[in-house]
Image (cartoon, grey):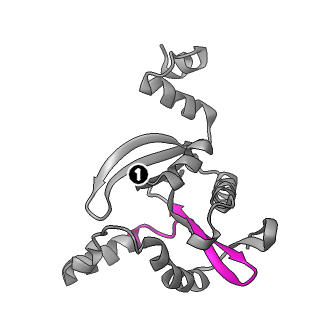
Amino acid sequence: MFTKNLDHGYVIKEMKPDDFWPLWDAHSPAIFRDVLFSFPWRQHLTEKENAEMALLSKNKGTPYRLLLALFKEDEFVGWSFGDQKNVDNDYYMRNSAILPKHRRQGLYSALLTTHLELIKEKGFQKITSSHHVTNNAVLIPKLKAGFIISGFEMDDGFGLLVNLTYFTNPLRREMMDVRAGLIKPNDEIKSALKI
């Protein structure tokens, strides 16, 4: 299991689900207590719908999952986790947070950088995440790390979200600038598009 020491006694550790989720359950309310409201749609499914979802999840197999926890000595102070999406080479960064009293020390950026490095080492081509459109504390570090805005969505559970994507392949990243109309295709892009 992966471990990385940071300054001032902080440590990032990869964790097993049985060790990670109890910490998440105990500490995530501190992060989400000021959220206006989230719609816990899973709690409103019928027994039949829950059974169908259980069957569907069995069809997915076992996707790769990474659970990272941040500690200061023995105190749990943050996390970052995600998993492989349905497409083989896509990874979804599901959630990351630093508990309030440990913020503004560069810990989120360190956790993000570590998460990206570990995912790139696994060979994923595209790393995605979704965030509330006003969550600058997360959006700014992700944009600085090389993520780009790749879309928006209205979600029944969380409201208006911005989708971010990080491409590990530089040509795919450059193609997004061409597709968005920011730059003209260079010779490499023209060749890839056969134009």
Residue located at (47% from left, 69% from top): 61
Residue located at (67% from left, 54% from top): 113
The image quadrant of residue 11 is: bottom right
| Tag 1 residue | 134
**Magenta stretch contains residue 100:** no
The image quadrant of residue 99 is: bottom right
- From the image, give the main secondary structure of the stretch colored magenta: strand
Looking at the image, is 169 positioned above or below residue 17? above
- Image quadrant holding the N terminus, namely bottom right
Is label 1 in a helix, a strand or a loop? loop
Question: What count of labels does the image hold?
Answer: 1
Give the amino acid type for the residue marked by disc 1 in the picture. Answer: Thr
Pinpoint residue 50: horizontal percent, then vertical percent. 27, 79
Indicate left or right for 57 with 72 as reference. Answer: left
- Residue 91 makes an appearance in the image: no
- Residue 112 makes an appearance in the image: yes
Looking at the image, is 147 positioned above or below residue 105? above
Residue located at (32% from left, 62% from top): 158
Indicate left or right for 10 with 126 as reference. Answer: right
Q: Nearer the viewer, residue 15 or 9?
A: 9
Pinpoint residue 4: horizontal percent, then vertical percent. 77, 67
**Magenta stretch contains residue 82:** yes
Residue located at (58% from left, 46% from top): 125
Looking at the image, is 79 positioned above or below residue 131? below
Pinpoint residue 26: horizontal percent, then vertical percent. 51, 85
Q: Nearer the viewer, residue 134 or 114?
A: 134
Which residues are drawn in magenta? 58-83
